[in-house]
Image: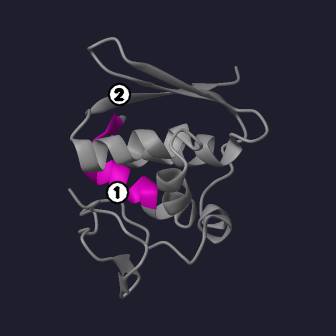
């Protein structure tokens, strides 16, 4: 099955094969750095947990190398009511932009993107997104 999300073709800023989310959508720019500039810093977030009733748990700590993912997943939690579903995953993948293809080429290199791809392309989830903040 061909992936739904391909950066090889764009139409009006959206990738072919995807429908823009209906709620809370901010059209992405041309790259992760530019997309992050449009998001709040969320400096008080210490970690983001993505869980499922099946016992699956994915933790993203707020540490160097993971801060972009913490910001993106925090926004997913806030914009999509704490639920990581297909709509939220499409939005998240648009934020990661150029790194999505890299994640596909080298499996496991970007586990936070892999999780979003699993939701969009494999029907995994939905997941709960929980944000831990400094007290």
Q: How many marks?
A: 2
Q: Marks 2 and 1, how far apart in space?
A: 16 Å
Say whether residue 91 is magenta.
Answer: yes
**Residue 38, picture quadrant:** bottom right
SS type, badge 1: helix
Residue 106 spot, x, y in % from top left: 55, 49
Label 1 belongs to which residue? Answer: 90
Secondary structure at badge 2 equals strand
Decide: is 30 above or below 61: below
Left or right: residue 71 compared with residue 6 = right
| Residue 98 in picture, x, y percent from top left | 56, 67
Residue range (magenta)? 83-93
Q: Is residue 54 magenta?
A: no
Above or below 61: residue 12: below
| Crowd rating for badge 1 (residues with CA inside 10 Å; few <14, some 14–19, many 20+) | many
Please report the residue visible at 37 percent of the width from the left and 48 percent of the height from the top: 117
- The residue located at (70%, 24%) in the rendering is 134
Query: What residue lies at 70% left-to-right and 32% top-to-bottom?
Result: 62
Q: Quadrant of residue 27?
A: bottom left
Residue to which mark 2 is pinned: 128
Comes first in the chain, label 2 or label 1: 1
Q: Quadrant of residue 114?
A: top left
Residue 72 at what x, y percent from top left?
A: 54, 49
Q: Label 2 crowding class (10 Å Cα cut-off): few <14, some 14-19, many 20+? A: some
Q: Nearer the viewer, mark 2 or mark 1?
A: 1
Q: Residue at x 43, y 68 (%)?
A: 26
Predominant SS along the magenta part: helix
Quadrant for the C terminus in the image: top right
């Amino acid at each position: 099955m061909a992936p739904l999300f391909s950066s090889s073709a764009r139409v009006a800023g959206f990738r072919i094969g995807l429908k823009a989310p209906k709620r809370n959508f901010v059209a992405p720019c041309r790259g992760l750095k530019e997309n992050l500039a449009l998001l709040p810093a969320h400096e008080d977030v210490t970690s983001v947990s993505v869980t499922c009733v099946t016992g699956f748990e994915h933790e993203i700590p707020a540490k160097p190398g993971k801060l972009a993912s913490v910001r993106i997943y925090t926004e997913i939690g806030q914009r999509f009511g704490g639920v990581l579903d297909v709509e939220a995953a499409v939005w998240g993948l648009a934020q990661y932009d150029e790194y999505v293809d890299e994640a596909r080429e080298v499996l496991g290199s970007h586990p936070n993107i892999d999780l979003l791809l699993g939701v969009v392309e494999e029907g995994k989830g939905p997941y709960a997104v929980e944000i831990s903040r400094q007290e």
